[in-house]
Image (tube, rainbow, N blue to C red):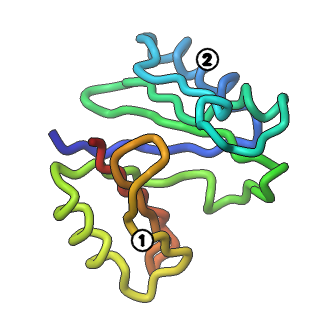
Amino acid sequence: MARVSTYLNFMGNTEEAFEFYRSVFGGEFTTLDRMGDIPGMPLTEEDQVKVMHVALPILGCHTLMGTDMLESLGHRLTIGNNLSIAIEPDSLEQAQQLHRDLNVNATDVQEIAPAPWGGHYGSLVDQFGVRWMFNVPD
């Protein structure tokens, strides 16, 4: 089933932020993966324990998701890249169509392609500065 989530980026304190959100909204994480869980990623020991992906259902059918940006990989958190709209369409074809339709004067375009965690992933920043993430699970 298709869904839309809010995706938050943090500079190394995702776990702290999501523990806070969990204390506010209750519930349990449906996912908590570490950077070190991805084989072949050249990471320091400190970065390996950072959060690669976390998901916390909050209100209604909405899920709050997040990740740590890694300074060691050149990531910098700025207002504008700290929030994304994450879309999980019903099919790869639907994801590709939405990606094409939003890709009008877009920047920072990552075409939808196979992802290291399985499925397919792509992203872009639309002409209005909104970051969209497309994830199609296997």
Question: SS of the residue at dot 1?
Answer: strand
Q: Find residue 72 and name its label.
A: none
Q: Earlier in the sequence, mark 2 or mark 1?
A: 2
Left or right, 95 with respect to 9, comes to left
Give the residue displayed 44% in from the left and 51% down from the top.
Answer: 115
The picture places residue 20, in percent across and down from the top left corner, at: 62, 19
Q: Is residue 44 above or below residue 22?
A: below
Give the residue displayed 84% in from the left and 36% down from the top.
Answer: 44
Viewer-closest of 17 and 111: 111
Question: Splitting the image into 4 quarters, where does residue 23 fall?
Answer: top right
Give the residue displayed 43% in from the left and 44% down from the top.
Answer: 6
Q: Is residue 92 above or below residue 55?
A: below
Q: Residues within 10 Å of mark 2 (few under 14, many from 20)?
A: some
The picture places residue 132, in percent across and down from the top left corner, at: 42, 61
Q: Amino acid at mark 1?
A: Glu
Quarter in which the C terminus is drawn: top left
Left or right, 14 with respect to 123, comes to right
Give the residue displayed 39% in from the left and 62% down from the top.
Answer: 113
Q: Which residue is mark 2?
A: 19
Viewer-closest of 130 and 117: 117
Q: Is residue 23 above or below residue 135?
A: above
Left or right, 46 with respect to 130, comes to right
Tally of marks: 2
Q: Residues within 10 Å of mark 1 (few under 14, many from 20)?
A: some
Q: Which residue is mark 1?
A: 111
Quarter in which the N terminus is drawn: top left
Q: Amino acid at mark 2?
A: Glu
Viewer-closest of 126 and 26: 126
The picture places residue 134, in percent across and down from the top left corner, at: 36, 57
Q: Is residue 26 above or below residue 97?
A: above
The picture places residue 61, in percent across and down from the top left corner, at: 25, 30
Question: SS of the residue at dot 2?
Answer: helix
